[in-house]
Amino acid sequence: MRGADDLSQPARLVAGNWKMNGASGALREAHALAEALSQAPAACRVALFPPALLIHRMAEQVAGSSVQVGAQDCHAESDGAYTGDLSAEMLHEAGARLVILGHSERRTGYRESDADVTAKVEAALRGGLEPVVCVGETLEQRDAGRALDVVAVQLQGSLPDSLDGHPFAVAYEPIWAIGTGRTPTVEQVEVVHGRIHALLAARFASGAAIPVLYGGSVKPSNAAELLHARGVDGALVGGASLKAADFLPIVRAA
Ligand code: 13P
């Protein structure tokens, strides 16, 4: 793994997004993962993003291990009259160190715009959370030959300039590959990741060190191929991150 001050290449990260899955019994999976990585350290960073209610307990459980804990979203403000929401500061206090922002399930389900995501990224920085910013096209957009343009617009619109020099990651998650069992070809992944890396390098002084993760139906059987595609610096894994027995081989493939 590279040193934290090495800005020449991205630190690889394999992240597990539990989405709205996992009651307290699922904490045993985090424990099993941390145990396994204590015995045989991973060659990459590893993070789990459980439902917010589990962050505190999971963070306590994996304390001292290499597993980091993150949140799946945060509000753009630090506090105030926002019923049902959680701020970056609150999530940090609970033990989160990263936060997924702009996931397609939030862009679609909650109509989050690029501007909303930018505001949340700024909030994450204020609250001490490392953002993992998601972009990705629909099947309709890909079939229309617009995947690269869509991703470029989302990327530029979702990242504030203030990110430069801060640790953050981008996740390319084609919407049609999320939870469907379908994945893009290695070539399709490499084309999009190449474009994302080029845009990041053009915009941020720290661009070369920003990891670009692939997400969408990553599982043990396809992890090695996807994780070793050119320009892929890790994975954002949904369903296959819920069980340590599935997630561990993906971590090992990185
Ligand atoms: P799946 O791995 O279940 O397709 O989910 C991907 C994802 O959305 C991760 O954020």
Image (cartoon, helix red, strand yellow):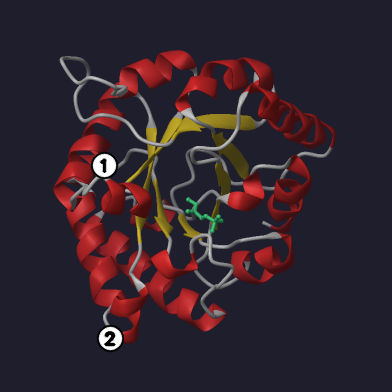
Under tag 1, what secondary structure?
helix
Asked whether disc 1 touches disc 2, contact meaning CB atoms under 8 Å apart, the reply is no
Amino acid residing under circle 2: Ala
Label 1 to label 2: alpha-carbon separation: 32 Å
- Asked whether mark 1 and ligand 1 are closer than 8 Å, the reply comes as no
Image coordinates of residue 53 in percent, x first then y, are 49, 21
Judging by the rendered image, the residue that carries numbered circle 1 is 163
Image coordinates of residue 7 in percent, x first then y, are 43, 48
Q: Nearer the viewer, residue 201 or 55?
A: 55
If you read the primary sequence from the N terminus, does the residue marked by circle 1 or circle 2 appear first? Answer: 2
| Residue lying at the far right of the rendered structure | 39
**Residue at coordinates 74% horizontally, 52% vertically from top-left?**
252
Amino acid residing under circle 1: Leu
Under tag 2, what secondary structure?
loop
Q: Quadrant of the C terminus?
A: bottom right
Q: Is 62 positioned to the left or the right of 110 in the image?
A: right
Crowdedness near tag 2: few (<14), some (14–19) or many (≥20) residues, C-alpha within 10 Å: few
Judging by the rendered image, the residue that carries numbered circle 2 is 144
**Residue at coordinates 21% horizontally, 30% vertically from top-left?**
76
**Residue at coordinates 46% horizontally, 25% vertically from top-left?**
52
On screen, residue 151 above or below 111: below
Confirm whether residue 8 shows in the render: yes
Image coordinates of residue 191 in percent, x first then y, are 42, 79
* Number of numbered discs overlaid on the protein picture: 2
Confirm whether residue 174 shows in the render: no
Q: Is 80 positioned to the left or the right of 24 in the image?
A: left
**Residue at coordinates 73% horizontally, 60% vertically from top-left?**
220
Label 1 vs label 2, nearer the camera: 2
On screen, residue 137 above or below 39: below
